[in-house]
Image: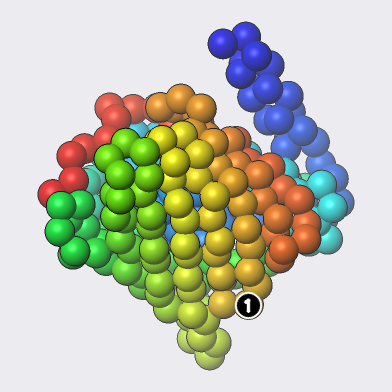
Amino acid sequence: MRFWTILILTTLLAVLIPAGSARAQQCGPACPACSGKAIGDLLPPGTVLGSGLLIPDGEEETAVLNARYGLFSWMDAGVGYAVEAEEVIWSVRVQPIAQNLDGWRPALILGTGSVQTGGSDQSAYLQLAKTVEIVEGRLATSVAGGYATDLPDMQEDWVLGLLSLTLYDRVSPFYTFDGINSHVGLSYFATEWLTLTAYALEMSDFALSVVIQWGPGEDEEE
């Protein structure tokens, strides 16, 4: 426990140090660093999530803080803040259809936020997401695909995608495409409330994320 406490405090202090010109960023709609999950599930009602993202060699984004709150079983909302740039971007996600873990029905997620690194784009998006448990408690795969457009002009369109594996409910390697760039990463679900994620943003820039989540815990899926 002492090791994790020191690691969390060290990383959050690093995120809070101004370094270069940062831009507000909420990551993609299925980003493990924002959701604390492998697929970007909505937060259960009453659950609070805080995250810090550090990109040491980032040209536009180097340090970002995020906070998110579960309002209802079908809705959560959050805000991102870049310390030095003093820019804010807000995010709302609505899930009109929840996935059926015992069947093939995917979740449908509608939202607004930033879907790409390297800028504080405010976008609107829709996403289909499905997790399939291949070996109970040992191996699961998650797939998400969607569409995003910029706000308020709606003059640009992007295709979104994510593929991840979850091993023993602890480790999740993943690949994401934000419509412009590809990213790979590895999430480690250290406890029910702590997730650590290492990224290769745009397949090159190293980044580290710490996610702390607390609240009533996960509601049962349909």
Q: What residue did someone put label 1 on? A: 180
Question: Is 164 drawn above or below residue 167 in the view shown?
Answer: below
Three-letter code, disc 1: Ile
Farthest bottom residue in view: 155
Left or right of residue 18, residue 138 in this image: left
Residue 165 in the image: state x and y as whole percent.
45, 51
Query: Where does the N terminus fall, quadrant-wise?
Result: top right
Determine whether 59 is above or below 11 in the image: below
Spot the residue most to the front.
135
Q: Position of residue 44 (x, y in %)?
A: 28, 40
User: Disc 1 on helix, strand or loop?
Assistant: loop
Q: Nearer the viewer, residue 115 or 130?
A: 130
Residue 18 visible at all: yes
Q: Position of residue 38 (x, y in %)?
A: 44, 48
Q: Can you see residue 110? A: no
The number of callouts visible is 1
Left or right: residue 93 compared with residue 175: left
Residue 178 vs residue 153, the one in the foreground: 178
